[in-house]
Amino acid sequence: MTLDKKRQERVDAIQAAIKDTPHFREDAASSAFFARELENIESQTYKVEFPEFKMTQLLPVTAEAGPGAESHTYYMFEAVGIAQLIKNYATDFKRVDVKGKKYSLNFENFGDSYGYNFQEIENAKFAKRPLDSMKAEAAREVMEQTIEEIMAFGYPEASITGFFNNANISQVVLPNNSSNTDTNWLLKSPLNVIADVNAIIRAPYTVTKGRERVNMVVLPNRLYTHLWDTPKSADSDTSILEYLQKKHKDVQFTDHHFLDDFQGGGSDKVIAYSRMPRKLKFHIPVRFRSLEPHWNGAEYMVNAYSRLGGLQFVRPLSSAYAEVDL
């Protein structure tokens, strides 16, 4: 198999990294085999998808800062000013400016590793079969799980902010049920549940006087299933969810289990927001990258890392959340 230039450069880099290690110092054939296999495993691992991890679907992701950036500065703002009618040769154009607070995101690396002992390499070479890719895929899966959790909740130790617990999202306080006991949707009528969802969706539009409209609603698994399974009325075969989807044609409804009994607080959380990069985006300059292998005395270890910078929340008024009692 002929490799393209980039992949061949990676093979050469791996081979250069292991050429002076005990097992490969005088065995060029095994060195070449391991380098080719490792590069192939890396290439396949980058393509593996993990649909169970949803945060990269829920938030726009950007690598614009680049892998070498240490920080990224932005403003959380709202536009101020208004355009006006101008006459011929007018020079008094109204100034439009921004007001807001300056924020900086710091980028941090998160890493794990996998490895192969020399006997595994020799066995694969002898049998003329590929090296097992499961180790690399497991390392990638662990990294994706880490990214999932950091995108949702941040990483306070590194001052990385997440989305689900972001303090800049405005709360909508929902009314209690007819018994005035709590806000549990399972104890409310379908019409009252629909009214609650409408209130959450409407909140950013109301607060910003029509400037902001949400296009995404994320529900806890429990409540999403309830909306899916429950008819909107006793004589209807349309579920609450189907009704809402028809009413709000520009809004996508989805779910995430992180919102169930949110952070153990005794209530579910529902979030509505505008999924647009100019409103919010999460910085991931490096999603997953493997480094050259090194001999640790027992195995050829491959360190891998991701580089994250956190949530850039430019227009927090484009989002709202509500708590629903369990």
Image: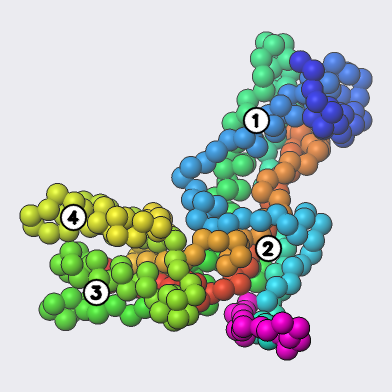
**In this figure, which residue is indicated by the disc labeled 3?**
183
Which label number is shown at residue 309? Answer: 2
Residue 213 appearing in the image: yes
Q: Earlier in the sequence, mark 2 or mark 4?
A: 4
Image coords of residue 4 (percent x, y): 80, 25
Alpha carbon of mark 1 to alpha carbon of mark 4: how far? 42 Å
> What residue is drawn where x is 12% and y is 78%?
179
Q: Specify which label sits upstream in the sequence, 1 or 4.
A: 1
Quadrant the N terminus occupies: top right
Q: Is residue 305 above or below residue 41?
A: below
* Horizontal relation, residue 181 to residue 221: left or right: left
Q: Residues within 10 Å of mark 4 (few under 14, many from 20)?
A: some
| Above or below 152: residue 131 | above
Q: Amino acid at mark 2?
A: Gly
- Residue highlighted by disc 4: 230
Residue at x-position 86% and y-position 31%: 9
Indicate the quadrant containing the C terminus: top left, top right, bottom left or bottom right: bottom left
Left or right for 235, reference 127 = left
Mark 3 vs 2, N-terminal side: 3
- For marks 2 and 1 on the same chain, the one whose residue lies earlier in the sequence: 1
Secondary element under disc 4, as helix, strand or loop, is loop
* Residue 44 disc label: 1
Are the residues tagged 3 and 2 within 8 Å (C-beta)? no
Residue at the image point whose x is 37% and y is 73% from the top: 202
* Residue 83, magenta (yes or no): yes
Q: Nearer the viewer, residue 259 or 38?
A: 259
> Is any atom of residue 155 visible in this view?
no
- Marks 3 and 4, how far apart in space? 17 Å
Q: Position of residue 213 (x, y in %)?
A: 45, 68
Q: Amino acid at mark 4?
A: Thr
Comes first in the chain, label 3 or label 1? 1
- Give the residues in magenta: 76-93
